[in-house]
Image: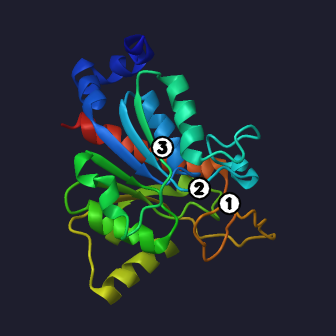
Amino acid sequence: MTGDLFNRTELLLGADAMERIREKRVIIFGVGGVGSWCAECLVREGIMHLTIVDSDVVCVTNCNRQLMATTKTIGKPKVEALRQRLLEINPEAEIVALQKNFSNETAEEFHIETFDYVIDAIDSLRDKISLILKATTTQTLFSSMGAALRIDPTKVRVSEFWKVKGDPLAAAMRSAMRRNKLFPARKFLCVHSEEQPLPNRGKALQDGSQTFTKVQTNGSLAHITAIFGMTLAGLVVQDICKE
């Protein structure tokens, strides 16, 4: 059945590229509005070995933008709800779901060195920096900058981290790195928006589901977070096809 699933993909990319895609191991940190769409796109394009990492559970406020978030999955671990969805697409895929939080303290638990690609879709500034510093020492990393507070899909771009413009998250990360004199071991590409963040126009619902504290809860839309996630997946597949 697997061969038939990817007939249209192989028609475009060729058998050799499909074989390389099937062999690659990918890990995604954060499967919210960005990471969940990235995961689905990767599985639909033939990735057979995918690990998804997120410590949170699905809440009602996730339903506006997160792939696996529906009224039926509220209260379930995000990684488990997403794993079930991905296996419905390809039952033969190896989907490892880890309900954990990446941090400097837990970094060694994930054995990042065993993966070909690392996807950063983490919200926490501190943990995001820790992942980037860890992953860029040995692996190919693609990272998502801020997708919240944007509505214009035509402003989504891909840039090298130090060349990302107009993104407060990237600016804060670079400032923290310079202040602490800790820098990525190699260059890496980021998905970001050139649209200036818009203001929130309402009050955020505090549902208490998150296992870390955000500085601020911001409004976000599915069409933007999905574009970010699918672009990250596209960077992975494009890189494999260049081999």
Q: What element carries label 3?
A: helix
User: Pointer 2: what residue?
Assistant: 56
User: Pointer 3: what residue?
Assistant: 38
Left or right: where 214 falls relative to 25: right
Disc 2 marks a residue whose amino acid type is Asp
Q: What element carries label 1?
A: loop
Crowding near the residue tagged with mark 2, few <14, some 14–19, many ≥20 C-alpha atoms within 10 Å = many
User: Pointer 1: what residue?
Assistant: 209
Disc 1 marks a residue whose amino acid type is Ser
* CA–CA distance in space, label 1 to label 3: 22 Å
Pick the quarter of the image with the C terminus: top left
Residue beneath the point at 57% across and 65% down? 195
On the image, the x and y values in percent for residue 133 come to 29, 69
Disc 3 marks a residue whose amino acid type is Cys
Q: Is residue 39 above or below residue 100?
A: above
Crowding near the residue tagged with mark 3, few <14, some 14–19, many ≥20 C-alpha atoms within 10 Å = many
Most foreground residue, 72 or 151: 72
Q: What element carries label 2?
A: loop
On the image, the x and y values in percent for residue 116 come to 25, 45
Who comes first in sequence, dot 1 or dot 3?
A: 3
Pick the quarter of the image with the N terminus: top left
Q: Is residue 26 visible?
A: yes
